[in-house]
Image (cartoon, helix red, strand yellow):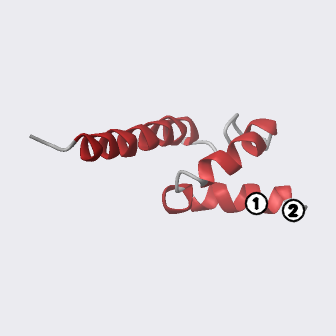
Amino acid sequence: MRDRTEAFHEWDEHEDKRPLGVIETRLGGREWIMGADYTIADISMLRWVRNLVVEASRPGWSAGCGRRCSGG
């Protein structure tokens, strides 16, 4: 029988990845969350998504948002 802590960590890891899948689907064929334009949706999602390792899965979007937020 698995340890409850191990089972929780497996569940937690899956739950972290599920929202990234939703975002990945939304970004499919788009440069930004809402389409062709950078919006408040991208700004509001950036910090949260970075915490879920978007750097590895969508580095272009993450870097683009970072440049836009810094005025670059």
Crowd band around label 1 with a 10 angstrom C-alpha radius: few (<14), some (14–19), many (20+): some
Query: Distance from label 1 to label 2 (Cα)?
Result: 6 Å
| Image location of residue 62, percent across then percent down | 65, 57
| Image location of residue 65, percent across then percent down | 74, 55
- Res 67 seen here: yes
Is label 1 in contact with label 2 (beta carbons under 8 Å)? yes
Please state which of residues 28 and 49 is positioned toward the viewer in this rendering. 49
Q: Which residue is mark 1?
A: 66
Residue type at numbered disc 2? Ser
Q: Which residue is mark 2?
A: 70
- Res 31 seen here: no
Residue type at numbered disc 1? Gly
**Residue in the image at 57% along x and 41% along y:** 27
**Residue in the image at 56% along x and 61% along y:** 55
Q: Name the secondary structure under disc 1.
A: helix
**Residue in the image at 29% along x and 45% along y:** 5
| Image location of residue 19, percent across then percent down | 50, 37
Q: Quadrant of residue 16 in the image?
A: top left
| Image location of residue 21, percent across then percent down | 45, 39
Q: Could you tell whether 57 is left or right of 7 in the image?
A: right
